[in-house]
Amino acid sequence: MTDRHGSHGPDHGLERLIFFSDAVFAIAITLLIIEVHVPELEGSATDAQWIAALFHLFPSFSAFALSFIVIGAIWTSHHATLSMLSQFDRSLIWPNMLMLMAIAFLPFSTALLSRGSLSIVPYVFYSASLLIAALLKTRLTLVALRPELISSGVPQQAVVVERRLAWVMPIVSAAAVILSAFVAQWGMLALLGIPIARRLPFFRRPDF
């Protein structure tokens, strides 16, 4: 057994990489809700007060939903990339670890965004965090989808499309950073374009 695959074989190494990554994604996506605190009202609070308190949490709910969808999209891309591989290579470890570090940081960026500040800083910071995570995921995709690692049953066109899809989130996140610097909410609206961009003919996955 070569050193490249590790002492337990290629399947074992790839499975460990996937399981560890899934655990980090699951923890990060769960931590998003931690910053959404239940309103602290007296037992005698009226319905109107409860409604007002819940309405006050709208920025937190919005930030939670946005980040849940974004992290889910990155996980989906991560899953699609690694499912194309037939063997493990040590060169995957650190690109994957750096991407996971960026994913683990997103709950903090989400908490900052949920403050609902009128300042553009939280919005630019959040978009920049997504951009870094997206770029690191793209790097992982380019490292992983090398001919010697790809399963023989994966069509070449599927690999080409997956490489293209890896650039969707970096492009949209970069646009969000720029737009947030002018009008904060525009950047968040730009992020909603991620699922739309993925459906463009250039990025669409072929059916095999």
Image (spheres, rainbow, N blue to C red):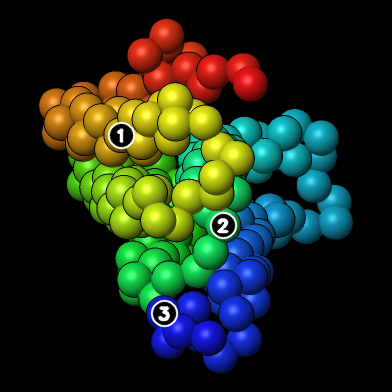
Task: Name the side, left or right, on which 188 lies relative to 11.
Answer: left
**Residue 204: percent from left, percent from top:** 48, 17
The label on residue 86 is: 2
Q: Is residue 115 above or below residue 69?
A: below
Amino acid type, label 2: Ser
Task: Name the side, left or right, on which 52 lies relative to 189.
Answer: right
**Residue 74: percent from left, percent from top:** 49, 45
Q: What is the C-alpha distance between the residues marked 2 and 3?
A: 13 Å
Tell me what residue is drawn at x 62 percent, y 17 percent: 207
In terms of secondary structure, where does tag 3 sit?
Answer: loop
Q: Is residue 186 visible?
A: yes
Q: Is residue 97 above or below residue 142?
A: below
The label on residue 4 is: 3
**Residue 184 figure quarter:** top left
Q: Earlier in the sequence, mark 2 or mark 1?
A: 2
Residue placed most toward the observer, 207 or 20: 207
Tell me what residue is drawn at x 36 percent, y 14 percent: 202
Tell me what residue is drawn at x 48 percent, y 50 percent: 150
